[in-house]
């Protein structure tokens, strides 16, 4: 048993991503059309030229692929609908890529969409299944807030100091967001201001939490050998990994809420597939799942970008800033974009696509060759995780 | 007359008072002359959950009995559970069945509600005491949740709480000898039931139309005369049936909803004929009048202090009078419970607005999050042991605890069938915690903790209750309590929370 991967077999040749906003005037249908149109146009492909589609969404419409087939009028096409918590968009891309690699299709599209802002509530809301009433009722913010005191305690960091460190992460993301017209929040937010805000869960304030937005993004993929037919600068998939957790952290009395084992497992699998041995130096930039500021902190360690117990220092040193050694969430992250669940994963790939093609404008990192995308869904102790690695050249 | 081969009466008892209290001086119109406080059921408590708490106290090994498997033996021998309250959480649906499930009684044990009237509490207790125990012991649970109109006397003088009594005969159930030796332990009666008396007349004292939240009362002076006569009649009958002379009474407890008559009845025991009798602490000052539960609450208080061979008279005045007379035995020394008066020394104060919110008299803005949906009846029934009994499962080789129970262990070394793991009575410690100010709750914020059970024998992620957020600490010892998480579409969602263990 092994995760063989499909390194360099599949390429992304076209992408689209709409601005993430409170799109009061756009339906999920509108967003699907708006996100897929630029992807079609850039490759010269029409909807009918794509052999198969994967739609990632957690909430849009009733549970079928017709949510995509109907607005795009995809006559006679297979549309697979996938859902995997907050990694839903990336999951669409992963399955589309495997279908190509299998040889079943020549051209595929992965689309992610979420219409969050029609609910009338703050934050994300799930539609719970019929249940016995014993499942906990807690916000994601509260579950992730458990990490802050645990990390502070384990590594001997003063809790107030750590609170400032995670505010620095939000400050950095907000700064990156100011440079990105697709981002929802485009203003600087100094860490000192964030620290003054009242907590909403544990020690986290509203500015430690990802925003909420509607959004959509899309990618067209073909086999690597066909890639140059559609673009001069294809992006090659080096690795795709996924771990759906068992909920062990809420069963095992030893789990200490200072790390996210599912993320570490997914990262290690991806590094193995891609042949990466030193992620800190071999990855040029990464888009990671910063659902909360504290999440991004521990991810730096789980993804192997910092030694255990040191990420907080690296944050203060600016390692992960746009001009730092390993820029993280160069587009502004979930913090600046908001988190339309089905779209976020593909939005993150979109930023890597821009960076690896050196089309990221003011946000462009220098000489990138490998990018990493990380999603997680669920909560500490009960989590799933996705990691992909992309490159702008074939390795062999 | 009873002609029983063996003594029968109370085997064990438990009195439960909620953690929260409201100072009477905080009830408007605020008056510094208002003395004491009343106990207030938490926003997540009702008469059923308080009944569960009292039943668990009665069946626990607290106070002398070793905390081994004796609880389960006591539970196994219960053939009937009777629950009485004038403030039932459900009408039509049997509340006793929820208690039955929470304390994990055998399926063959009956569960009955004695509801509606204030008098039904002592009525259930006396009826259970008067019947024979051939088929097993009887658990009688009384609960009261007394609210009243804002600024009313009922609000001021009411209180919330529950009492439970395990009743049986010295012989134990008739079939106990056929059971395994483990299950055939004989009962130790700690207070023998000597007999009782009753007096009834129809007159209008207090009433509440069904569907109305609060009780109304006729001018108090009207019923005083009637209660006085009824009390004389009932007491005389009780003394005769019990074969007890006035001078034999050591403790007297008079409770009821008609305070003037209660006072007048108490005066009876100050007459020279009742030379020894001392009035039991009526618990009104720090608890408040718990209505149907109150004779039980006061009886619990007496049983926690009375020496062996003491005679106790309990009388309750509500649309008539019920009197019950008991005599303590030597065994009482071995099964003491913490006196209610001692438990009343602990607790956290709430303000009047919080009290009004908890009783749903005052509605405040909830967080802008979806309200929880109603639970699924089939899902709850499938998970009965988990949801009501807090029973998980353990791996066959690693002993790894799974809450909720899992069929497949998270540890792959476990290959066989998982074993049953009852965890409701196991204490735990807080590993980490947080305060959620965003999530929907009937009383935000939600305080939430990761807890590890004794000796790191397992973990659970659980909401905390009966705690102020400023009291939270990592390492804090907690115990599991049965609570009402929320109500949706008229369905109460019961499950467990954790609360600090307070010494």
Image: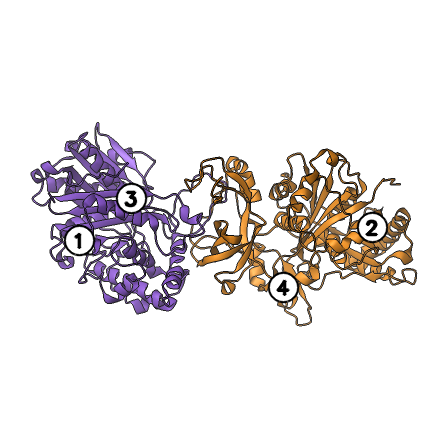
Q: Which residue is mark 3?
A: A342
Subunit of mark 1?
A
Subunit of mark 4?
B
Question: Residue A222 is drawn in which quadrant?
Answer: top left
Nearest the viewer among B345 and B233 is B345
Residue B199, position in %: x, y?
85, 47
Quarter holding the N terminus of chain A is top left
Q: CA distance from mark 1 to mark 2?
A: 86 Å
Q: CA distance from mark 3 to mark 4?
A: 51 Å
Q: Which residue is mark 1?
A: A282
Closer to the eye: label 1 or 2: 1
Q: Residues within 10 Å of mark 4 (few under 14, many from 20)?
A: some
Q: Which residue is mark 2?
A: B323
User: In terms of sequence position, does the residue under pointer 1 or pointer 3 come before the other?
Assistant: 1
Please give the letter of the chain rendered in purple: A
Residue B321, position in %: x, y?
82, 50
Do the residues under discs 1 and 3 have CB atoms within 8 angstroms? Answer: no
Please give the letter of the chain rendered in orange: B
Question: Do we see residue B79 in this rendering?
Answer: no
Quarter holding the C terminus of chain A is top left
Q: Which residue is mark 4?
A: B346
Closer to the eye: label 2 or 4: 4
Q: CA distance from mark 1 to mark 3?
A: 29 Å
């Amino acid at each position: 048993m092994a995760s063989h991967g499909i390194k360099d077999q599949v390429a992304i040749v076209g992408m689209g991503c709409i601005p993430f906003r409170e799109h009061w005037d756009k339906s999920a249908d509108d967003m699907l059309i708006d996100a897929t149109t630029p992807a079609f146009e850039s490759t010269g492909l029409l909807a009918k030229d794509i052999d198969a589609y994967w739609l990632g969404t957690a909430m849009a419409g009733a549970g079928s692929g017709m949510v995509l087939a109907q607005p795009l009028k995809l006559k006679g096409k297979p549309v697979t609908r996938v859902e995997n918590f907050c990694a839903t968009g990336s999951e669409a891309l992963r399955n589309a890529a495997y279908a190509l690699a299998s040889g079943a299709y020549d051209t595929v599209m992965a689309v992610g969409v979420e219409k969050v802002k029609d609910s009338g509530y703050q934050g994300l809301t799930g539609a719970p299944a019929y249940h016995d009433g014993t499942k906990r009722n807690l916000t994601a913010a509260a579950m992730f807030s458990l990490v802050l005191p645990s990390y502070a305690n384990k590594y001997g960091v003063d809790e107030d100091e750590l609170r400032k460190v995670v505010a620095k992460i939000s400050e950095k993301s907000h700064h990156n967001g100011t440079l990105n017209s697709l981002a929802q929040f485009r203003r600087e937010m100094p860490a000192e201001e964030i620290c003054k805000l009242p907590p909403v869960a544990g020690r986290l304030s509203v500015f430690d939490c990802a925003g909420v937005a509607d959004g959509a993004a899309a990618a067209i993929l073909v086999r690597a050998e066909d890639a140059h037919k559609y673009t001069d600068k294809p992006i090659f998939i080096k690795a795709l990994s996924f771990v759906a957790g068992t909920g062990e952290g809420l069963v095992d009395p030893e789990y200490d809420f200072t790390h996210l084992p599912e993320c570490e497992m997914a990262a290690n699998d991806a590094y193995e597939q891609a042949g990466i041995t030193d992620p800190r130096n071999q990855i040029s930039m990464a888009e990671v799942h910063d659902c909360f500021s504290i999440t991004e902190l521990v991810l730096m360690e789980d993804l192997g970008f910092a030694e255990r117990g040191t990420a907080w220092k690296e944050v203060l040193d600016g390692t992960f800033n746009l001009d730092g050694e390993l820029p993280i969430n160069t587009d502004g992250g979930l913090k600046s974009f908001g988190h339309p669940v089905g779209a976020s994963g593909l939005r993150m790939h979109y930023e890597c696509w821009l960076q690896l093609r050196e089309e990221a404008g003011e946000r462009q990192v220098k000489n990138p060759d490998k990018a990493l995308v990380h999603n997680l869904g669920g909560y500490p102790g009960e989590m799933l995780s996705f990691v992909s690695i992309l490159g702008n050249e074939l390795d062999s | 007359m009873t002609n029983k081969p063996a003594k029968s009466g109370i085997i064990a008892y438990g009195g439960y008072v909620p953690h929260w209290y409201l100072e009477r001086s905080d009830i408007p119109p605020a008056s510094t002359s208002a003395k004491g406080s009343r106990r207030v059921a938490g926003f997540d408590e009702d008469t059923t959950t308080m009944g569960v708490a009292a039943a668990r106290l009665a069946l626990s090994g607290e106070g002398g009995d070793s905390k081994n498997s004796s609880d389960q033996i006591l539970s196994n021998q219960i053939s009937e559970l009777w629950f009485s309250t004038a403030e039932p959480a459900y009408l039509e649906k049997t509340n006793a069945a929820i208690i039955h499930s929470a304390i994990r009684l055998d399926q063959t044990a009956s569960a009955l509600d004695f509801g509606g009237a204030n008098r039904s509490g002592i009525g259930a207790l006396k009826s259970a005491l008067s019947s024979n125990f051939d088929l097993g012991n009887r658990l009688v649970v009384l609960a009261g949740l007394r609210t009243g109109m804002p600024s009313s006397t009922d609000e001021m003088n009411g209180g919330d709480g529950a009492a439970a009594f395990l009743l049986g005969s010295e012989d134990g159930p008739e079939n106990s000898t056929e059971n395994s030796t483990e299950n055939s332990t004989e009962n130790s009666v700690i207070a023998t039931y000597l007999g009782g008396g009753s007096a009834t007349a129809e007159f209008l004292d207090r009433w509440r139309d069904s569907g109305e939240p609060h009780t109304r009362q006729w001018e108090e002076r009207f019923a005083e005369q009637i209660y006085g006569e009824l009390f004389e009649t009932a007491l005389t009958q009780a003394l005769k049936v019990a074969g007890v002379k006035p001078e034999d009474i050591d403790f007297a407890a008079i409770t009821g909803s008609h305070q003037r008559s209660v006072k007048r009845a108490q005066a009876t025991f100050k007459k020279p004929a009742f030379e020894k009798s001392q009035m039991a602490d009526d618990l009104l000052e720090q608890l408040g009048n718990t209505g149907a539960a109150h004779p039980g609450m006061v009886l619990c208080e007496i049983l926690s202090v009375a020496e062996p061979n003491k005679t106790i008279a309990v009388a309750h005045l509500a649309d008539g009078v019920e009197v019950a007379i008991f005599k303590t035995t030597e065994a009482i020394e071995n099964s003491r419970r913490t006196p209610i008066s001692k438990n009343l020394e602990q607790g956290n104060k709430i303000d009047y607005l919080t009290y009004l919110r908890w009783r749903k008299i005052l509605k405040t803005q909830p967080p802008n999050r979806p309200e929880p949906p109603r639970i699924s009846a089939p899902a709850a029934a499938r998970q009965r042991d988990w949801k009501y009994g807090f029973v998980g499962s353990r791996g066959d080789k690693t002993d790894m605890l799974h809450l909720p129970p899992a069929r497949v262990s998270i540890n792959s070394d476990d290959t066989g069938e998982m074993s049953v793991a009852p965890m409701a009575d196991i204490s735990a410690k807080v590993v980490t915690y947080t305060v959620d100010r965003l999530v929907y709750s009937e009383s935000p914020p939600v305080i939430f903790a990761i807890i590890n059970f004794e000796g790191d024998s397992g973990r659970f992620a659980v909401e905390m209750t009966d705690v102020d957020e400023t009291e939270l600490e990592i390492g804090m010892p907690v115990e599991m309590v049965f609570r009402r998480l929320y109500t949706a579409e008229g369905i109460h969602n019961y499950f467990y929370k954790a609360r600090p263990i307070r010494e």
